[in-house]
Amino acid sequence: MRRTKEDAEQTRRAILASAMDMFYEKGYSKTTFDEIAKRIGLTKGAVYWYFRNKPDIVAALINDFAEKYMANIRDFIANNQPVSFDSIIGMQLLNNKQIREDPQFYKFLFFVSCQMEWSEAIINKIQPSIEQTKQVTRALFIDALQTLQKNGQIKDDVNISMICEILMMMYGGMLDGFLTKRLTNDLDELVKTGFTLIFNNIKTESK
């Protein structure tokens, strides 16, 4: 029985990997279940056994990549205590490193940012997966910033939730520029400069 479960999980992951490659190469709307199946020697029916439709595949991809990303971030946080402004920047630099070194992660981000046709129906279908990922990321930022504020390193009147939103949106814009090859500067340097500019405006004078 355990072997059967292992085989099923391997098949599921093979389907997701095939779908990711097809979405990256052709885009979401032009990819069919037949193409996903043929790429790994399966029938279309076998793919339907695991996923009812393409939005289900996208939701699974978001969940899988988010889980891997968050595991790396949590390990980083655990190994970089106490929290500091540098460690918050380090979390983003770790994400940059993963994008450069993991081809599948790069393909995933490029697909969802540049090749995904985000119709209202699709967004409604996978919104829970997207929102869960955003909430976890936001929580990590807020926890780190609140800790610095409690420690007297961030001014008392600073709205932590707003700063978190600014940082996330700023990084999202940088990432979009990197994926579409529109950046004229190094992504790591942009992150360090941009985040430092924000932090310098919310730090207490003594820090």
Image (tube, helix red, strand yellow):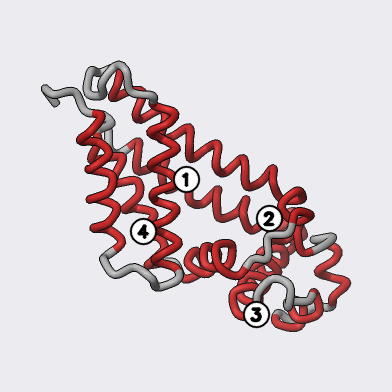
- Distance Cα–Cα, label 2 vs label 1: 17 Å
User: As rendered, which of 90 and 199 lies closer to the eye?
Assistant: 199
Is disc 4 surrounded by few (<14), some (14 to 19) or many (20+) residues within 10 Å? some
For marks 2 and 3 on the same chain, the one whose residue lies earlier in the sequence: 3
Label 2 sits on a secondary structure element that is helix
- Distance Cα–Cα, label 4 vs label 2: 22 Å
Q: Quadrant location of residue 111?
A: bottom right
Which disc, if any, is residue 96? 4
Whether pointer 4 and pointer 3 mark residues with C-beta atoms closer than 8 Å, the reply is no
Identify the residue at image location x=18%, y=23%: 204
Name the amino acid, label 4: Asn
The residue where tag 3 is placed is: 26
Identify the residue at image location x=48%, y=40%: 137
Name the amino acid, label 1: Ala
The residue where tag 1 is placed is: 71
Whether pointer 2 and pointer 3 mark residues with C-beta atoms closer than 8 Å, the reply is no
Name the amino acid, label 3: Lys
Whether pointer 3 and pointer 1 mark residues with C-beta atoms closer than 8 Å, the reply is no
User: As rendered, which of 13 and 20 lies closer to the eye?
Assistant: 20
Name the amino acid, label 2: Ala
Position of residue 153 measured from the top left corner of the image (x, y, whole percent): 22, 23
Task: Classify residue 119 as left or right of residue 103.
Answer: right
Q: Quadrant of the C terminus?
A: top left
Whether pointer 2 and pointer 1 mark residues with C-beta atoms closer than 8 Å, the reply is no
- Distance Cα–Cα, label 1 vs label 4: 15 Å
Which disc, if any, is residue 60? 2
